[in-house]
Image: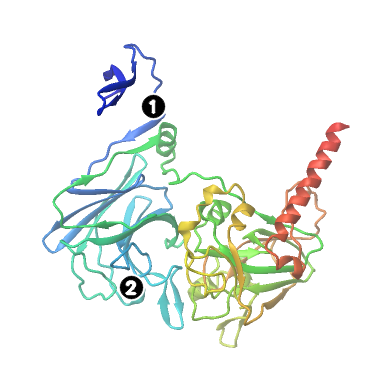
Amino acid sequence: MTIFDINYISVWDREQSENLGSVIIPDELNVPPALSKIIKVESRLPNCEQLHQRLQINWEIFGPQITFELIGQLKKDDYMAFGLSGSDNSSQMLGSDIALAYMETHLGFVRDYNITGIFPCINVLGNYQGVCPDEKVGGVDNFQVNLFERQDTLTRITYRRNLQNVGDDGDKIFEKSRKSFIVWAIGKLTNSKDPGFHHIYPKHDISLVFGRKPEKNCFYFTTSKIETIDAIQSGLQQSSIITKPWGPLRLLNRTMTTLYARLGDSGGLRGYYGSTGLASPNLVWYINGLLAPILYVKRGRTYTFRIEGGNNPSQAELYNPLYITNDPYGGFTELTDSERKKYQVYAGIEFDRRGRPNPTSAGRLCVWRIPNRNDSINDNINYFDKRRADTNRFQSFIQYRNRLHFHCDPSTSAQILQWTPNSSVPDIVYYQSYTHKNMGNRIIVVDDFTTSSYAGLSFTTSSSTNSIDQNPKSILYKQIAIAIVVILMITNVSSK
C-alpha cells in the first residue's frame, strides 16, 4: 500500500461511534521521492529474528546440527557477533560462547570465541583471559563456514555447528525446546583482526527458542541512496553508525614537563576510534585528563611520566605498564619475537642479557570509569558498563568525561618514568600499553616549539601541577577560561 491507495484519514472513537476528525487526501499528490532505499533480503533458512535495524539472525536445525546466517550492514573493518549468553537468566557477555563473523576482501570468516573477561585476550600468568579464540584457551573452533557475500551494503555469512558440546568445555549447548538467552554485537576489528570493544549491542535481555516452529520476524534493511552509491563505487560499506569524533585531542605546553598517564573509557566511536581510526579495548590512556591526546615534546628536554595504569598482573584488563616505541599499535607482550625485532623501544622496558623484556613503569591504578549500577566509586574496578555510556549524547569529550567517575587506588603509588628524547629519536613515536594494543597515540618530537609548522595549530593545554591534575574538574575550568579569553580577544579585534 502507498499514499496513492488511501482516500482519507480519520480518527474514530469506537465506543461513541463518532468521527473525531478526518481529512480527505487529494487524488493528485506531488510526493517527493524517498530519501532512503529499501534493500530486500531473503534467507532460505526458515527462522529469522531482527536483532537490530542493522543486524538479523536466521537459523535452521537439521539433525544434530544448527545452521545460522548472520546478515548485517557493516563497514569493511566491522565484525558481527552472535552466541549464547554467559547466564541462564539474562543476556550477559561475560562467560558467553559466541561466533565472530567478518569479511576480509572477498573471503568470509567465522571464529569461535569464549569470553572470560570484558577485555582483549591476553596471557595472564600463563593463562589466556578475556575475549579469546577457543584455540587459545584449550578449545576447538567448531564452526564450518558455508556461504558468504557482500552486496548492497550488506554482509551475510552462513555457518553451522553441532547442537551439543563436542569435546570443547568452552562450547555451550544449543537447546531446541528450552528458551535460551543470547548475546550479539557489532564492533570494530583491530589491525590483527581481533575484536575491539563493540559499539552496537542489546540494551535488554533477549531469548530465543531455537527449535520453535518456523517463524520470520525480520524486516528489510534500509539505507540512504547516496550511501548506497558511495558504497558501490568504493567497494566498501559505510560505517554502521555515523558519528562526529571529539578529537584528535592535542596536548602542547611549552613549559610542561610532567605528564599524568591514567586509564579511562575509550569513548566509543566518537572517542578513541574517531580520533585514531583504530579499534580499541574498553580502556585507553588518559594523559593529563585527556583521552589519548597527541603529545608534543622537545628534543633534549626531560619529561616525567607519572604512570598510574595498574600494577597487578593478575588483573589482566587493569595491568598496563606504559612504554614509548615506534610501534603504532603497542601491546609488546603479545608480539612474537620476529614482530618485536621490527620496532624500537625508547623507554619503559628493560631487557636482560638474554633479551627477555621487563616493564619498568607499572604504577597504581587510577581510572576514569563508568560505574556499574550497584557499584560505589571505591569498589574494586573490574567491569565497565557501556550500557550507561551513549557517547552521542555528548557534544565534546569534556562533557563526556564529566559523566565519568575518577578513582585512584590509595594503597600504592605512581611509577615514575623519565624520558629525554635525543637526536636519534624519530619525529613521531608512540606511548603505548605493554599488555594491550591500541591504547595510546602519537608523540610528536620537535626541535623547537617556535617552528612555524606548529604556530597555526589549535592545541589543548593542561596544567602539569599535581594539585590541579588531581581535581577532575580543573582542566575543564582552565579550558573555559582560555575560551573566554579567546572570545574577548576576537571581540576586541572585531570592534576595532
Residue 108 image offset from top left, x and y in percent: 32, 54
Earlier in the chain: of badge 1 and badge 2, it is 1
For this view, does 287 lie left or right of residue 219? right
* Residue 327 placement: quadrant: bottom right
Q: Secondary structure at mark 1?
A: loop
Q: Quadrant of the N terminus?
A: top left
Residue 158 image offset from top left, x and y in percent: 25, 53
* Residue 443 placement: quadrant: bottom right
Q: CA distance from mark 1 to mark 2?
A: 48 Å
> What's the amino acid at mark 1?
Ala
Disc tally is 2
Query: Residue 302, can we see it?
Result: yes
Depth check, front residue: 162 or 53? 53
> What's the amino acid at mark 2?
Glu
Residue 334, placed above or below residue 291: below
For this view, does 82 lie left or right of residue 358? left
Q: Which residue is drawn at the image coordinates 69% and 69% (left, top)?
A: 260
Depth check, front residue: 130 or 179? 179
Q: Quadrant of the C terminus?
A: top right
Residue 331 image offset from top left, x and y in percent: 53, 70
Q: Which residue is mark 1?
A: 34
Residue 82 image offset from top left, x and y in percent: 31, 58
Query: Which mark, residue 186?
Result: none
Q: Looking at this rendering, what residue extends furthest in the front direction?
A: 16
Q: Looking at this rendering, what residue extends furthest in the bottom direction?
A: 353
Q: Which residue is drawn at the image coordinates 49% and 75% (left, top)?
A: 316
Q: Mark 1, mark 2: which one is toward the viewer?
A: 1
Q: Secondary structure at mark 2?
A: helix
Depth check, front residue: 388 or 195? 388
For this view, does 165 lie left or right of residue 95? left
Residue 146, placed above or below residue 262: above
Q: Which residue is mark 2?
A: 135
